[in-house]
Each structure stands twice: as structure tokens, then as C-alpha cells.
Image (cartoon, grey):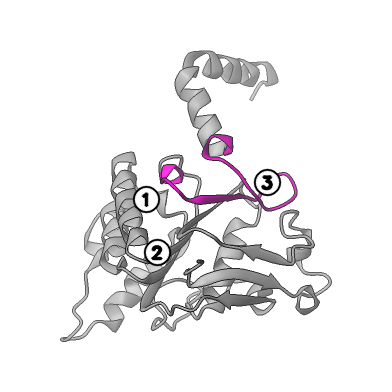
Amino acid sequence: MNDLFIRAVLFDWDKVDEDSYLRNIEALKGIERLEFHKPITFFVGENGSGKSTLLEAVAIACGFNPEGGTKNYAFSTHDTHSELCDAIRITRGYRKEKWGYFLRAESFYNVATQEEEYADARHPSAKYHERSHGESFLALAQNYLRANGMYFFDEPEAALSPQRQLTLLMEIYRCAKEGAQFLIATHSPVLLGIPDADIYCFDHGSIHLCAYEETESYQVTEMFINNREALLGRLLEDLKETGR
């Protein structure tokens, strides 16, 4: 039985302007439905492939602030989200999440600042700005990861060392086993290694499921580690020949 909080996303392209850039994103063109079957689902693809755009739209449609935070966060530093959130409908499961969080790398500073402004005597600030970027990023994620929560992570590896990515991997895996659901856009070959997760690839013109070993993040990392000297030699030689 599918006991996920979000089972599918339905698209209504009639609600997207004819001249919207969304219609030019290859992976999203013509898509009518995207289904989820696992507690952890990854979105992967090249920059500009649409993975973060879709993740953002689903998070907003579920009631989260476009810049991130919990559903109680209501602020806007710079309004940049697309209209896709108004053109999708969420198919929900029979369970209702108890809490959740939208964590995105690009607006983390704004959310950390807002957290301090929301703090009071009963809810003291975690003072994320007083820690290193990586430490505060991981601490924020750990503070809000709980069982039976709905979580949206957009490139959570951005501020984390490989070791801290492994720590986050364990936290995500534990939470998923305790009934949480995750939608994660990432380039991290570490996080993508979480067992029993679905990986949706946004490359090659359509959104499609792929295996871990088929992701570009894995393939490029493996190629670099196993053939570092030869690869760098070829790349840097090409650079010399082009005169750059």
C-alpha cells in the first residue's frame, strides 16, 4: 500500500502562460502526471533541467514559503518563484504529515535571519549565523528532521563536506524509516547512494526513473577518481590548445 503523504503531482498546462519559460524546459514539456512510490525521491539533472523548479512548485503548493522554512514562515526577501505552483495539483495519501520543512541552499541565509526574528522567550533562536555555513546548515536540517514529516530539500549538499553529507544521509534514512517522506533535488553522489530511493532524472528531454549508476553525478565522480591524471591531462591540454 502506498502510504506516502504525496502520491503524485498533476499538471494543468492551461494555467501556464503561453510565453512562460516553463514551456521551454524540455523535461517538463507535456508532462501530465508524476508519481511517487518511495519515502525518498531524488530529482537529478544538469543545471537548468527543471528539477529545482518542480521541487519549489510542489513545496509551495503544499503550503511552504517559497524561500524555505516551515509552513509558519511567511516572509519574502526576493520574489523569484515560478507560476508552476499554480498549475499543479497534489494527490495526497490517507496519512497527514505532522510537520515538515523546505530547505534550499540558495536562500538559507534569509531563512536563518528570519529564524532569529521569529525567536522569543519560549522559542529561543538556534543562532545559525554564529556557526560556520556547513555546521549551521546541518544543524538546521537535524533540528527539523522528525518522524512522519514531509521534507523538501533543494541541493542540501551545497554547504556540507563529504563527511557531513554522510551524516545527513543517515538522518534522512532514519527519518524515512520512521514514516517521513523526502523530495530532494541534488547533485551529490553521496546522498544519491541512499538505499531504496527512487531517482528521477530530468535530462534527455523527459523525467524518467534511473539507477544510481546511471546518474551523471555518479558517472563523472567515478571517472574522475579512477582516471584523474588522464582526465585532467586531456582537459588541460584542450585548454592550452584553445588558448584559454
Quarter in which the C terminus is drawn: top right
Q: Where is residue 129? Give x, y as percent.
A: 27, 64
| Residue kind at label 3, given as amino acid type | Asp
Instruction: Find the magenta span and give its range.
Output: 191-215
What residue is disc 2 on?
A: 108
Q: State how far apart marks 3 and 2 are (Cα).
A: 26 Å
Q: Where is residue 98? Give x, y as percent.
A: 36, 79
Q: Residue furthest bottom?
A: 121
Q: State how far apart marks 1 and 3 are (Cα).
A: 24 Å
Under circle 1, the secondary element is helix
| Residue kind at label 1, given as amino acid type | Ala
Q: Where is residue 183? Give x, y as percent.
A: 49, 61
Side (left or right) of 30 relative to 94: right
Q: Are marks 2 and 1 in contact (CB under 8 Å)?
A: yes
What residue is disc 3 on?
A: 203
Side (left or right) of 53 relative to 28: left
Task: Tell me if residue 206 is in the magenta stretch.
Answer: yes
